[in-house]
């Protein structure tokens, strides 16, 4: 019945304590933000390792177009 409601609304509609619902929502938001930050950091570190040499110079010859 409540499949498409946001989590905070769902918890309030099911008579949960509103403060607990807000705390849970904040935890979920921080978890999503943390996962996004860690994923972005991982991509940046992998790109850094792949595109820079030991002298920290950008090696554009290491770039290739997809499909080549």
Image: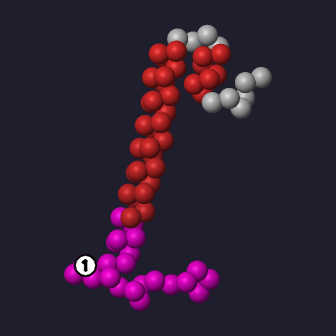
Judging depth in this view, the residue of 8 and 64 nearest the camera is 8
What quarter of the picture does the N terminus occupy? Answer: top right
Work out whether 64 lies above or below 38. Answer: below
Characterize the local packing of mark 1: few (<14), some (14-19) or many (20 or more) Cα atoms within 10 angstroms.
Answer: few
Q: Secondary structure at mark 1?
A: loop
Extreme residue in the bottom direction: 61
Q: Quadrant of residue 5?
A: top right
Q: Horizontal and vertical percent for residue 19? A: 47, 16
Asked which colour scheme the image uses, the reply is secondary structure
Q: Is residue 39 magenta?
A: no
- For residue 30, side relative to residue 13 (left or right): left
Q: Is residue 39 above or below residue 50?
A: above
Among the 4 quarters of the image, the one containing residue 30: top left
Specify the segment rendered in magenta: 45-68
Q: Is residue 56 left or right of residue 63?
A: left
Task: Kindly identify which residue carries mark 1.
Answer: 56
Residue 25 percent across, percent down from the top left:
50, 28
Could you tell me which residue is drawn at 48 percent across and 41 percent down? 32
Residue 65 percent coordinates (x, y): 55, 84
Q: Which residue is the extreme one toward the left?
A: 55
């Amino acid at each position: 019945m409540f499949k498409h409601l946001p989590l905070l609304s769902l918890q309030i509609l099911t008579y949960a304590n509103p403060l607990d619902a807000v705390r849970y929502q904040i935890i979920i938001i921080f978890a999503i933000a943390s996962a996004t930050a860690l994923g972005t950091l991982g991509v940046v570190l992998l790109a850094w390792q792949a595109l820079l040499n030991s002298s920290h110079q950008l090696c554009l010859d290491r770039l290739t177009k997809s499909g080549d």
